[in-house]
Every structure is written in C-alpha cells, then in structure tokens.
Amino acid sequence: MEIAPAQVTGSGADELERAAEAALRPRRLEEFVGQRVVRDQLSLVLQAALGRGTAPDHVLLSGPPGLGKTTLAMIIAAELGASLRVTSGPAIQHAGDLAAVLSSLEEGEVLFIDEIHRLARPAQELLYVAMEDFRVDVVVGKGAGASAIPLSLPRFTVVGATTRAGLLPAPLRDRFGFTGHLDFYSADELERVLTRSAGLLGAELAGEAAAELASRSRGTPRIANRLLRRVRDWAQVRGDGSLDLRAARAALDVYEVDILGLDRLDRAVLTALCVRFAGGPVGLTTLAVTVGEEPETVETVAEPFLVREGLVGRTPRGRVATPAAWRHLGLTPPADSATLFS
C-alpha cells in the first residue's frame, strides 16, 4: 500500500509506523542522538538512582511529536534494568483502569504513560497520590456502604510523555522530579540519525543524500526515518539500489516534499491564504473548509511547522500569510502585507 503524500511529513505515527520505528530506535542513552542537555541530565538522574539502589524520580518528557519521548522511556527502563509497562492517556478513562495497572506493578518497574495530558481527571487525581505516597485506595461497595481500602504499592517510576505540558494540572506536574523538554533537531543531528538508521536497514546512505533528507525533515527524527524508508523504496523499485542524492531527490518529488519540507497539505494552506484570501486574515474553520480538512488537522499537523518557519502568522483577526510564504509559492506579496501583522 502506497503512503499518501500528506502522511509522509506528518509527525504522528500509526501502528505500522511504530513497528517500523522500533527497529531503528537506540537501546541505550549513549546511542541516542541529539537532545544533549536532556540526555546529560537524565543520565545523571539514572546513575544516581542506580548508585543508591532505589527507583529514580518520576520523569516527565514534553515536546512536539516525533522527537524521541517514547524512545527515551524505553531507554530509561533499559538503563535501570527494569521492565517497562506501556499505556496511554486515552486508554485510561476511569480511575479503576489506572488502579488495575498500578496494583499489578512490580518493584522498580517503569510505567510509561504516553499522552499523559489526556488522562481523565479522576485518573489524574489517583495517579498523583500513587506517585507520591505509593498507594491507591480501592473502593469496595457502592453508595453509603462503600469503603476505601488503602493498597500499598511497590516503588516504581512513572515516565510521562506529553506534547502539551500546559494541559497537565499543577498537582500532577509537581509530582515529577525531573522534567525534560525535547527540542527540534539540527540538520547535523538529523544526518547522524539518518546515517545510523541506514546502517541498521543494511543500506549505505550517501552524505549528500543524508544532507538533503535532513534539510527536509522538519527537525524531526521520525520524519527523517520515514523519508529514508521512502528513498530506499524508490532506489529498490525505480533506481539501481543506491541511496544517493539522485534517489533522495526523486523520492522526495514523488511524495511531494518540497525544499523546505512542506507537503501537499502545507502548500494547500499557503495557497488558500495567498490566492483565495489575498494573504488573510482568515479564521481557522474557514481555512480548513477551503483545503478540505478538519480544523484540528490544520491546527495540529500543518500550522505548527508553518508558524515555526515564519510562513504563517497568527493574529487576533485570524491566520495570515507572511511575505516568505508568498515568495515560497513564487508569488509577489502585496505592498501592504506588513500591515497584516499590526
């Protein structure tokens, strides 16, 4: 099944994507590329805990999708020599669901909760009590005859991952002893990621091809690895098997990833702003209808990168296209475009 162009540079991942990523993930902290500050800080936390023979503080990892939060959670468990229990916020909608998970944990185990900001409020309240006091109150019975039985838990470590740390309630956020924010990768770091991944795939990636892919990967390793696999596909089917600059550019053309890393949806948003609405301002809902997508898709998939690259601006009156957006589309910005940001 061919991947639609709009999916290639999306930072999300489905089940097939996660399976492909698993083979490329580093297993140890020393193998992890990029995020030097977070990596060094986390190494200190883990080494100190190992030296004391205790479970480390709970860890909260925040940042945009695709930067390595899940990988770091797996590395934490591996460095501690502990087993890893994986769940996610949307999968736990009742306090009882979380109580069942917590009560089954073993001493020193690592509990990874992806999208922890999406936990239901009752589950959040149960979790921060368990994180601090290592106990849960199991409610027996219903109505006036109900009673709470405290259940002691072994010491464990929660690793939470979130793309929206601001949505976490303060009581839960304060229970984490270490908080690390992951930033976008530089082109040099992405080249190292790509070279390592190509080796794991049993292929040799030319330096020029690595640089080309890195420059179009939005600073995100997940996207870089995804593009690498598409280049490998092109080289196998339409090329001579070599992952060189020609193969990289040809594959990127097939999947409509341009020189800045913009895909079909990104360019549709820019075209709508510049051509249909003369640069804006225009509301999110109107913009989404124009490009045939849901408002949430435009806001969470396309807009963050376009804003970060200085192609789209958010104003109190709506979204506007910057002069850089006009130039990227090969259009001439209107003379009064600067007033759109006032």
Image (cartoon, rainbow, N blue to C red):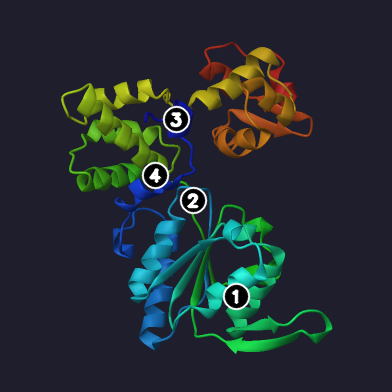
**Residue carrying label 4:** 16
What separation in Å lies between label 3 and label 4 (alpha carbons)? Answer: 22 Å
55 vs 237, nearest the viewer: 237
What separation in Å lies between label 4 and label 2 (alpha carbons)? Answer: 25 Å
Label 3, residues with CA under 10 Å away: few <14, some 14-19, many ≥20: some
Earlier in the chain: of badge 3 and badge 4, it is 4
Q: Which label sits on residue 99?
A: 1
What separation in Å lies between label 4 and label 1 (alpha carbons)? Answer: 30 Å
Q: Which label sits on residue 183?
A: 2
* Residue beneath the point at 30% across and 50% down: 24
Does the rendering let one see residue 174? no
Does the rendering let one see residue 292? yes
Query: Foreground mark, 3 or 1?
Result: 1
Identity, as a three-letter code, of the amino acid under mark 3: Gly
Earlier in the chain: of badge 1 and badge 2, it is 1
* Residue beneath the point at 41% across and 25% down: 259
Give the percent coordinates (x, y) of residue 167.
Answer: 68, 57
What is the quadrant of the C terminus in the image? Answer: top right
What separation in Å lies between label 3 and label 2 (alpha carbons)? Answer: 18 Å
Query: Foreground mark, 3 or 2?
Result: 3
Give the percent coordinates (x, y) of residue 53.
Answer: 39, 87
Identity, as a three-letter code, of the amino acid under mark 4: Leu
Judged from the image, the secondary structure of the residue bearing numbered disc 1 is: helix
What separation in Å lies between label 1 and label 2 (alpha carbons)? Answer: 33 Å
Q: In this view, does 264 lie above or below 66?
A: above
Label 1, residues with CA under 10 Å away: few <14, some 14-19, many ≥20: many
Give the percent coordinates (x, y) of residue 323.
Answer: 61, 21
Judged from the image, the secondary structure of the residue bearing numbered disc 2 is: loop
What separation in Å lies between label 3 and label 1 (alpha carbons)? Answer: 43 Å
Identity, as a three-letter code, of the amino acid under mark 2: Asp
**Residue carrying label 3:** 261
What is the quadrant of the N terminus in the image? Answer: top left
